[in-house]
Every structure is written in structure tokens, then in C-alpha cells.
Image (cartoon, rainbow, N blue to C red):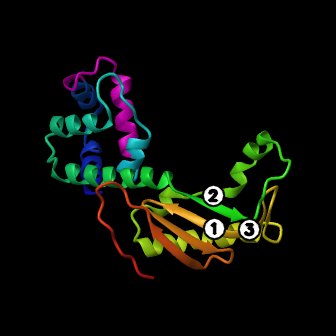
């Protein structure tokens, strides 16, 4: 991120007295709050780390602090605006992926199992996705990562058996607006589009 490199280079040239002056110019009565931002900004490798580790400090939120700091230091905000837009796109995609999951289909038929036991073991037939590993990658690459996750899961089971639910039949991936069906050996078998309101249909070929 060019804006972070630009900012860190500038911060390295400032004296402690200048930091105190700039903190007051930005409206901080408590220098420690300002200094906490500065120390973090000097130590990180990406703005993602900054946004992840900061919150509203009663003076600025994370984004507001950066814009105010760039103004105070007379730095161009062109790169900063671009980097924040890219971060927000990535963050939105991560949050969308976090809603996705893999449902493990088995041949389970309820007999006398109590509801509380079924609820307690429901997590055994759901797999969460690694949103950070999947974000910002093309769909085919994302599916390759997910296939490896499915294969790993199956290999870690007792010959394809899941506690209470029985033998695995298929893995059903609910991913964004698509449903993919994988065999127990992680081969893609089928997919369907979940059409959202006012959303045009799309065709994806494999």
C-alpha cells in the first residue's frame, strides 16, 4: 500500500516535540491516544492491520484519523483514498464469505435421538470457510482451495463417518449466490444459482 509507505517515511522524520504539536492540532488532549495510533502505524505492513487493531477513540474513528493525519502532515491523500477503497472492497468480500459454509449431506434419518443431542452435534456437519484465504481470489482458485478443505476433512473422518450423522454422501457449498455440490472425494458434481431479487441470471461453466 503506497499510502502507508508514504506515511511511514514521513513519520520517521518527526521529532517527539513535533508529535506533541501535531496531536494538539488534531484535537487530542490525551497525547497517549494519539501516540498509540502513531506507534501502530509505524509498526504495521498493511492498512488492514491498522483497521483491525483500532476503534473510535472519542476523537476519530480509524479512517478519520488517517485523513486528518495526512492533512496535518500535508501529505497527498490520493494514494490513501485508493488504498482505503481497496481495503473496504476486501473487507466487504470477507464479510460476505463469512456467511458462506459447507453443509455435509449424509443418509441420516432420525429415530429416537433427542432434539438437544441433534442440536449439540449440528456443527459436525457444517464447515466454515477461511474467508481471509479466499478473499480477492478468482472463483476457480477459491473453489480449488475449498476442494482441498473438503478432501482434508474427509480424510480426517473415521472412514467417512460423522458422529451421529453417519456416512458422508456429499458436501454442499453455499457460497455467495451459488450452491455447489461436491462428492466425498472433493470432485465438483453440480452447481445451482440462487437468484436474488432483481438479480439477473448468470451462467458459469466448469
* Disc 3/disc 2 C-alpha distance (Å): 13 Å
Residue at 26% of width from left, 26% of height from top? 23
Mark closer to the chain start, 1 or 2: 2
Residue that badge 3 annotates: 168
Q: Using the image, determine if residue 158 lies above or below residue 90.
A: below
Mark 1, other Cα within 10 Å: few <14 / some 14–19 / many ≥20? many
Pick out the residue farthest to the bottom: 206
Answer yes or no: do the residues labelled 1 and 3 have beta carbons within 8 Å? yes
Residue mark closest to the camera, 1 vs 2: 1
Specify the quadrant of the image occupied by residue 167: bottom right
Instruction: Determine the secondary structure under disc 2.
Output: strand
Q: Nearer the viewer, mark 3 or mark 2?
A: 3
Disc sitting over residue 18 in the figure: none
In the rendered structure, are the residues bearing label 1 and label 2 in contact, judged by CB atoms less than 8 Å apart? Answer: yes
**Residue under pointer 2:** 127
Image quadrant of residue 115?
top right
Q: Which residues are magenta?
A: 24-42
Residue 171: give its label.
1
Residue 82 forms part of the magenta stretch: no
Is 179 rendered above or below residue 27? below
Residues 147 and 15: in front is: 147
> Is 25 in the magenta?
yes
Quick check: 124 left or right of 91?
right
Amino acid at each position: 500500500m503506497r499510502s502507508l509507505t508514504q506515511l511511514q517515511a514521513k513519520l520517521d522524520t518527526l521529532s517527539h516535540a513535533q508529535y506533541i504539536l501535531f496531536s494538539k492540532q488534531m484535537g487530542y488532549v490525551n497525547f497517549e491516544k494519539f501516540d498509540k495510533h502513531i506507534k501502530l502505524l509505524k509498526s504495521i505492513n498493511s492498512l488492514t492491520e491498522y483497521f483491525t487493531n483500532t476503534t473510535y477513540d472519542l476523537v476519530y474513528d480509524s479512517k478519520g484519523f488517517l485523513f486528518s493525519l495526512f492533512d496535518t502532515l500535508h501529505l497527498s491523500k490520493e494514494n490513501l483514498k485508493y488504498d482505503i477503497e481497496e481495503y473496504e472492497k476486501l473487507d466487504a468480500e470477507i464479510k460476505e464469505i463469512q456467511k458462506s459454509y459447507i453443509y455435509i449431506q449424509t443418509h441420516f434419518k432420525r429415530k429416537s435421538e433427542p432434539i438437544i443431542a441433534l442440536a449439540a452435534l449440528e456443527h459436525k456437519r457444517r464447515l466454515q470457510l477461511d474467508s481471509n484465504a479466499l478473499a480477492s481470489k478468482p472463483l476457480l482458485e477459491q473453489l480449488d482451495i475449498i476442494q482441498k478443505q473438503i478432501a482434508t476433512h474427509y480424510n480426517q473422518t473415521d472412514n467417512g463417518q460423522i458422529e451421529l450423522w453417519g456416512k458422508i454422501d456429499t458436501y454442499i457449498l453455499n457460497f455467495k449466490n451459488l450452491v455447489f455440490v461436491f462428492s466425498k472425494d472433493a470432485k465438483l458434481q453440480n452447481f445451482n444459482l440462487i437468484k436474488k431479487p432483481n438479480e439477473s441470471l448468470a451462467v458459469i461453466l466448469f
